[in-house]
Amino acid sequence: MSLRELYQSYNGLVQFLPIYIREAHPVDGWWMGGGIMGKMVKKYSPAVAVDVYDPLTIEERRTVANRCETILQYAIRTYVDEMDDHVSKLYAAKPTRLYLVGLDGRVVYAGGIGPYGFKPNELKRAIDTYLRLITSETAKRNLLYSD
Amino acid sequence: MMNFITKSVHYRNKEVNWQKKYGANAPEVGALAPDFELHDVSGKHSVQLSDFREKKPVALVFGSFT
């Protein structure tokens, strides 16, 4: 399942917060846009950009995040980590990572580190399990109060 | 080709060290998710994780464009 399908399936039930963090493979860093790697990226991940430099200011970061948001068209507002990478560090989120936070503010699912540990299907299973749990808890509470 | 491999090893080691440094304190299942406030791409709208407490579960999707 893709992220887009996940957003569409659970929109309204779950609040999705896409958070743009420091670039993983900018032109002036660990660039994947050249040679054979570049061809593979273009073939297998056409939505991934290969022409982005690591933003140096928050305005540059917002501009790249905006481009990313526009091209991917998830129709969900993207939030941008600050230049000190504060949130990315709190969640060890680089290069990509997924979490699910429950109603009580506790972590329900902590995905692995991307790209290999980035598994939207795992998140989907965690969402399904959690939604079933809170639905049954609500039903139990309603039963208790109806007595 | 050699340059690409050398660069890849350099950046991979850098990323591994970053993960060692921050991964140790990343929240695990059952832990309280660290609160934060961030702005959107326009800089005009902000969100705070704790705003959703007792209202909706939240999926955090971290990533970049490359």
Image (cartoon, coloured by chain):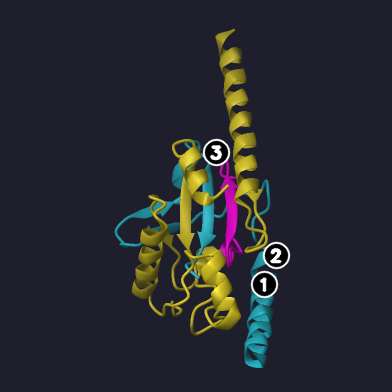
Chain colours: A yellow, B cyan
Tags 3 and 2 on a common chain: no
Pick the quarter of the image with the C terminus of chain A: top right
User: Height in image: A57 above or below B26?
Assistant: below
- 3D distance between C-alphas at marks 1 and 3: 29 Å
Q: Decide which of A120, A112 is in the foreground and name it.
A: A120
Within the magenta stretch, is there residue A96? yes
Magenta stretch?
A89-107
State the residue position of label 3: A103
Q: Which mark is on residue B24?
A: 2
Residue A85, image x, y percentages? 50, 70
* Number of residues whose C-alpha sits closer than 10 Å to that of mark 1, classed few (under 14), some (14–19) or many (20 or more): few
User: Height in image: A6 above or below A73?
Assistant: above
Residue A22, image x, y percentages? 50, 71
Residue A16, image x, y percentages? 47, 47
Residue depicted at x 48% and y 73%: A84
Q: Secondary structure at mark 1?
A: helix
Q: Secondary structure at mark 3?
A: loop
State the residue position of label 1: B21
Q: Identity of the amino acid at label 1?
A: Lys
- 3D distance between C-alphas at marks 3 and 2: 24 Å
**Badge 1 vs badge 3, beta-carbon distance below 8 Å:** no
Tags 1 and 2 on a common chain: yes
Q: Identity of the amino acid at label 2?
A: Ala
Indicate the chain on which mark 2 is placed.
B
Q: Decide which of A106, B42 is in the foreground and name it.
A: B42
User: For this view, does A67 lie left or right of residue A49?
Assistant: left
Residue depicted at x 64% and y 74%: B18
Q: Identity of the amino acid at label 3?
A: Leu
**Badge 1 vs badge 2, beta-carbon distance below 8 Å:** yes
